[in-house]
């Protein structure tokens, strides 16, 4: 996308020694670059070196204002962001020439398509200079209280995001500050945070600030100090053999707390000694065995389901994390890579559990971030909502500008539109107030016209033809936008309880049974030619075409002599060698498909557990599948492989056996495990080959900075599949 986005962090220029603090904003900036945006890094600076505020004290640790700007540019340079810095003076005056040298000014920044502001104290006159502005709240619950009490005067923005799941929701124990909030997960830029084995002394670590003061609201005093939380767990090292280390900003108080905590078994480090730069911070996290951390007491009290970007960096690096519970969450699991505790006993048990099955929890940690916190997806979703005025949070009584034809179909008599809540990319929940029918909600999807027609046919023609018309959400209304560039679909709202949120054996079984019905009923059905016309070909030709195209793209990359940065050195050649090997093996794989692939059938095409909903009915559990955008035709193995990979390896055997049992009444007999392994492996490697094509082409056409990190990530997927195939042949009994 050809957009200019001005990113406004909070005090990175005034805090030059905070490597972890800088990463909060690097995740956003690098994702914006990966999405093709031009990035401007906008900083307000107090140019008075006599400033005695906390920010000023931090700044002076790095030197004068001019030195702090130079240091920040040095920190940003490895990420291609040093030349993006724009400065303005917080007092409204001109930035001194020596400080501003080599930086953009606010006039240049204000020409951006969007201000993406992550600082709640950005001056209103600066925010108002932008044609469109979006604010992202990273202090959920606290910020809304500060706004309500007048402690923070948040400038008006066009749209407001928060990383707190309960902010602005009914039942939240704090006000909304007079704004309508949209939830977004915090982003992690995965190409910069690969999963690595621990290489240090094997400690569970964290990096933290110690102090934060208190504040009052509605007669209650809230504590904002991690010091208080950690001291409640002072005795934890005496209860667990897991070594614990805390890197904390203590400055002149270091010896005081070392004498208090080290006799209890804690190792204390000065945070600025181990995390002053983004690279040092990343190294410290990735050399750790895992994370143990407490939350600020206010986060625990307010129950926003807040999760630190620091914790997500540990998880992305393949490190289990044991952190304090901050409220029920739709995204955060319990004891699956991430452990959340409420008491000393729970913390002790969590550390024990993490160590008892470390490799599994390390893999689950990475998978959690990939599924919910991938910066390219998260930031892309924020951009989409921020730049689309009609899809934004609205107050209860305010209407939203959706196509009139869609509203006419949805509204039954007098009524109106309530809140619009973003669920994921291009998917929204719309609350309706409609006459005597009262309050209800629907799910809206904004689709490209071709995809819209395909998924309409799924709901109205193809699944009903198989007798499965009730196994996807009902399509309630369809309308195009004014320009005809996109289509809107309105579906019945199935709620939030996906299979991913609660993968019990009973719910998985119900879903597998539905998948089996879809495949057996769709095989050789008269509807398949129609599906082929509109959908994708997901059989063996999908594998061969992707391998061929990926080889061609990589060979062009080699011919153009486009070299990767040192950290991705050799990735092009290694991937090319791997793909050439796959091409040479195609004939053998084709024979396996011929003998064991089974008939072509109707495929969902994206069978992740987040796309399955299971609800209790009078007749038992009933599964439904959503998001049919990638529907196509091919062998059962394409769907089943994707589904199996959403589960730990030890769970896949019984899931496969359940599928085998479910298809047997239709006369299907699945192949033996070695052949199934080949079928599943081919499906996954075909998908991975597809993911090589686009970054390679982006490198050829525009030297995209994200291209080589993306190729390195795909290479990591291949290696992970080498080490842990979809099926462990030794663990399953051939049939």
Image (cartoon, rainbow, N blue to C red):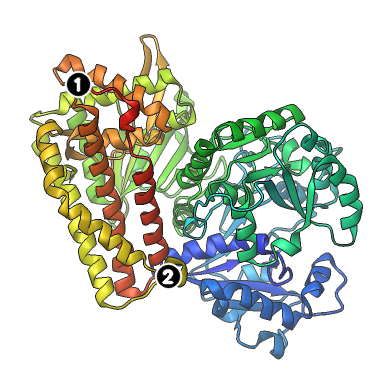
Q: Are there few (<14), some (14-19), or many (20+) residues within 10 Å of tag 1?
A: few
* Image x and y of residue 434, in percent: 45, 31
Q: In which quadrant of the rendered image does the C terminus lie?
A: top left
> Is 100 on the left-hand or right-hand side of 630?
right
Measuring 36% from the left and 28% from the top, which residue is drawn there?
Answer: 652
- Residue 467's mark? 1
Q: Is residue 239 above or below residue 139?
A: above
> Is 611 on the left-hand or right-hand side of 545?
right
- Residue 402's mark? none
- Residue bearing mark 2: 705
Q: Circle 1 — which element?
A: loop
Measuring 48% from the left and 30% from the top, which residue is drawn there?
Answer: 501
* Image x and y of residue 503, in percent: 45, 26
Residue 118 seen:
no
* Image x and y of residue 190, in percent: 48, 55
For the residue pair 451 and 308, the one nearer the viewer reads as 308
For the residues carrying marks 1 and 2, which lies nearer the camera in this image?
2
């Amino acid at each position: 996308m050809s957009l200019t986005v001005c990113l406004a962090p909070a005090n990175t220029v005034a805090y030059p020694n905070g490597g972890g603090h800088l990463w909060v904003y690097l995740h956003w900036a690098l994702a914006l670059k990966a999405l093709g945006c031009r990035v401007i890094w906008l900083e307000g600076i107090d140019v008075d070196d006599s400033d005695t505020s906390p920010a000023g004290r931090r700044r002076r640790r790095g030197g004068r204002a001019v030195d702090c700007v130079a240091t920040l540019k040095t920190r940003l340079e490895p990420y291609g962001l040093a030349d993006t810095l724009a400065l303005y003076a917080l007092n409204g005056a001109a930035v001194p020439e020596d400080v501003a040298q080599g930086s953009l000014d606010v006039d240049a920044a204000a020409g951006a398509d969007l201000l993406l502001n992550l600082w709640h104290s950005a001056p209103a006159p600066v925010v108002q200079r932008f044609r469109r502005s979006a604010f992202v709240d990273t202090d959920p619950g606290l910020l809304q209280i500060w706004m309500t009490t007048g402690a923070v005067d948040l400038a008006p923005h066009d749209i407001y995001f928060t990383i707190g799941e309960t902010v602005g929701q009914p039942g939240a124990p704090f006000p909304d500050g007079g704004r309508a909030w949209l939830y977004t997960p915090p982003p992690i830029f995965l190409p910069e945070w690969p999963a690595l084995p621990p290489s240090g002394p094997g400690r569970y670590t964290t990096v933290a600030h110690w102090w934060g003061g208190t504040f009052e609201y509605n007669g209650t005093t809230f504590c904002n100090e991690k010091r208080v939380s950690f001291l409640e767990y002072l005795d934890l090292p005496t209860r667990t053999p897991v070594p614990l280390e805390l890197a904390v900003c203590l400055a002149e108080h270091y010896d005081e707390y070392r004498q208090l905590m080290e006799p209890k078994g804690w190792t204390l480090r000065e945070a600025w000694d181990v995390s002053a730069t983004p690279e040092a911070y990343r190294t410290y996290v990735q050399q750790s065995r895992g994370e143990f951390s407490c939350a600020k007491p206010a986060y625990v009290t307010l129950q926003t389901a807040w999760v630190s970007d620091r914790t997500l960096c540990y998880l992305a690096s393949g490190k289990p994390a044991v952190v304090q519970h901050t409220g029920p969450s739709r995204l955060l699991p319990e004891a699956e890579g991430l452990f959340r505790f409420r008491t000393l006993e729970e913390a002790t048990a969590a550390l024990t559990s993490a160590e008892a099955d470390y490799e599994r929890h390390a893999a689950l940690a990475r998978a959690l971030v990939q599924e919910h916190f991938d910066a390219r997806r998260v930031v892309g979703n924020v951009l989409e909502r921020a730049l689309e005025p009609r899809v934004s949070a609205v107050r209860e009584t305010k209407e939203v500008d959706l196509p009139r034809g869609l509203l006419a179909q949805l509204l039954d008599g007098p009524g109106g539109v309530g809140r619009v809540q973003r669920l994921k990319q291009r998917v929204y929940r719309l609350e309706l107030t409609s006459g005597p029918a009262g309050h209800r909600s629907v799910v809206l999807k904004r689709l490209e016209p071709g995809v819209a027609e395909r998924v309409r046919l799924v709901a109205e023609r193809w699944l009903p033809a198989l007798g499965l018309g009730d196994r996807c959400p009902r399509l309630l209304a369809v309308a195009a936008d004014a320009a005809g560039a996109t289509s809107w679909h309105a579906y019945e709202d199935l709620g939030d309880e996906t299979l991913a949120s609660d993968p019990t054996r009973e719910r998985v079984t119900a879903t597998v049974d539905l998948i089996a019905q879809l495949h057996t009923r769709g095989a050789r059905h008269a509807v398949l030619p129609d599906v082929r016309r509109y959908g994708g070909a997901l059989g063996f030709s999908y594998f061969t075409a992707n391998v061929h195209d990926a080889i061609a793209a990589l060979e062009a990359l080699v011919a153009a002599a486009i070299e990767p940065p040192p950290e991705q050195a050799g990735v092009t050649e290694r991937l090319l060698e791997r793909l050439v090997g796959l091409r040479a093996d195609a004939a053998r794989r084709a024979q396996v498909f011929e003998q064991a692939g089974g008939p072509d059938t109707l495929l969902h095409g994206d069978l992740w557990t987040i796309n399955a909903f299971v609800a209790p009915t009078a007749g038992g559990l009933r599964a439904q599948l959503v998001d049919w955008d990638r529907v196509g035709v091919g062998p059962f193995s394409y769907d089943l492989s994707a589904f199996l990979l959403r589960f730990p390896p030890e769970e896949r055997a019984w899931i496969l056996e359940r599928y085998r049992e479910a298809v047997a009444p239709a006369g299907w007999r699945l192949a033996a495990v070695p052949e199934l392994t080949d079928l599943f492996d081919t499906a996954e490697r075909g998908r991975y080959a597809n993911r090589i094509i686009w970054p390679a082409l982006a490198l050829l056409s525009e030297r995209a900075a994200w291209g080589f990190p993306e190729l390195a990530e795909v290479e990591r997927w291949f290696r992970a599949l080498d080490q842990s195939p979809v099926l462990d042949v030794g663990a399953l009994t051939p049939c």
